[in-house]
Image: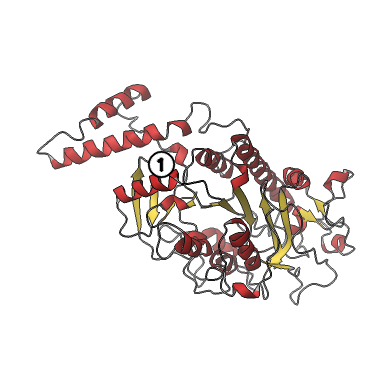
Amino acid sequence: MACHCDDFSKAQAGRDLRGIEPGMPVPAGTGLSRRAFLSRSSGLALSVFGGTLLSRMAMEEGIAVAQSLPSSPVLVSIFLPGGIDSLSVLAPIGDPRYAGLRPNLAVAPSSNPDDVFTEDDRLQWHPSAAPLRDLHRAGKVAVMPAIGYTGANQSHFTSRHFWEVGDLNPAGKIGWLGRYLDKHGSDDNPLQGLSLNRVLAPALASADVPISAVAYPNRFALNANSYVSDQALRTKVLESFGRQGNLPTDDDELGVARRVTRETVDVRSQLAPLLGSSSPWQSAVTYPSGVGLQERLAVLAEMLEMGLPLKVVAVDADGGFDTHANQNSSLPADLDVFARSLAAFQADLEARGVADRVLIHVWSEFGRRPKENGSGTDHGAAGLSFLVGTRAYGSMVGEFPGLDTLDPRSNLRSTSDFRAVYCSLLEQWLGVDADGIVPGAGSFARPTLVR
């Protein structure tokens, strides 16, 4: 299969959707209308997709009603872009072919017995994945060491598209989580499907119900620095102006300005718990420094504790996991930040008392080829996926197939299908029938993922 990595980094983004390479499947959700809403009920400034008849009042009422209902399970989907190298994260140092296939990139055997993967002693955790190793040893991580699908497509965009729509269909327009929301979601709660990105996560793309995107909810703030430098004074002035929002005026533009200012001040007030002088969130857990995935996860933990009516949340990890070259230079640092961010998020959920209703699904579009290219690894087939949480069935799903018999393209063979995992997540975690959500659901055996 062709390598599409130049376009992977240079693709032009579609309107409110991620970029794609020319000629590849368009992302699910293409064509959905987007509107911006300020919601006093949730304290968020949202880009809302779908729900074309949804009004501001209906949205606020829908969020308020959903927030008053009993807490439901939440699925958090974390995407590792680029195709992370599963044979480094869980290195098959006990496989006799590993050293020959990876003369420069093979992970060195560890003297620490804790680094050995408990379900298969041929495998060893990468040193940078130690936080994942510890969660797994605590029974909080289910590991799929060779997940994929038959006839793997090695294009970033096509393979990712298959995972997003839950089907090997390049023409799919609805995300698998969007189909779940269409069947079991609400007509007026866009927080039910939340993309913590600047653009819509295609897996959430629905046909009928509203969903939303917000990149950094903690960064919403009053911003008029060029006019009034003091934040407290600026807030006081704008609050005073906003209180005039209901006063009669013959100046339509003045009336609109007053109402918008009042709404902005209201939202800023709602967001106050997410804003801080030394940290943009309030957490007893220390996250890795930085403003990428770790910041989004920290804010998400607080949103969950606040009781916002979330059902499914999607977020992209940071890092350059498309490691065609200089893999030993980039992968350890990127894996380290990701693993520590994920472990901090899980610890944060536990500290806040909401961990038992949150399950985290980590996935990537494919794995890397077993044979290195010198300083890196090219696109492969079967890859790695995790489920993390106190309710995760903390064991191996499928098996590691070994390097002795590879697939016809000399890639790792898959031993579990991503669509079977989706069926189990829907039925065992979200409590709904996978039929009608995952095409061909009846043909997949359901692995045990939740306890």
Q: How many marks?
A: 1
Q: Position of residue 317 (x, y in %)?
A: 59, 50
310 or 107: nearer the viewer: 310
**Is residue 170 positioned above or below 127 on the image?**
below
In the drawing, does residue 431 fall left or right of residue 209? right
Residue 368 shows up from this direction:
no
In the drawing, does residue 333 fall left or right of residue 94? left
**Can you name the residue that lies furthest to the front here?**
70
Q: Quadrant of residue 257?
A: top left
**Is residue 381 positioned above or below 300 on the image?**
below
Residue at x-position 62% and y-position 51%: 360
**Is residue 133 positioned above or below 230 on the image?**
below
Q: Position of residue 175 (x, y in %)?
A: 50, 64
Q: Position of residue 308 (x, y in %)?
A: 47, 43
Q: Quadrant of residue 376?
A: bottom right
Q: Position of residue 253 (x, y in %)?
A: 17, 41
423 or 24: nearer the viewer: 423
Three-letter amino acid code of the residue under disc 1: Ser
Disc 1 crowd rating (10 Å Cα; few below 14, some 14-19, many 20+) is: many
Residue 329 shows up from this direction:
yes
Residue at x-position 61% and y-position 63%: 422
Q: Say how the picture is coloured.
A: secondary structure
In the drawing, does residue 409 fall left or right of residue 428? right
In the drawing, does residue 99 fall left or right of residue 144? right
**Is residue 85 positioned above or below 215 on the image?**
below
107 or 218: nearer the viewer: 218
Quarter of the image with the N terminus is bottom right
Say which element carries label 1: loop
Can you identify the residue that label 1 sits on? 42
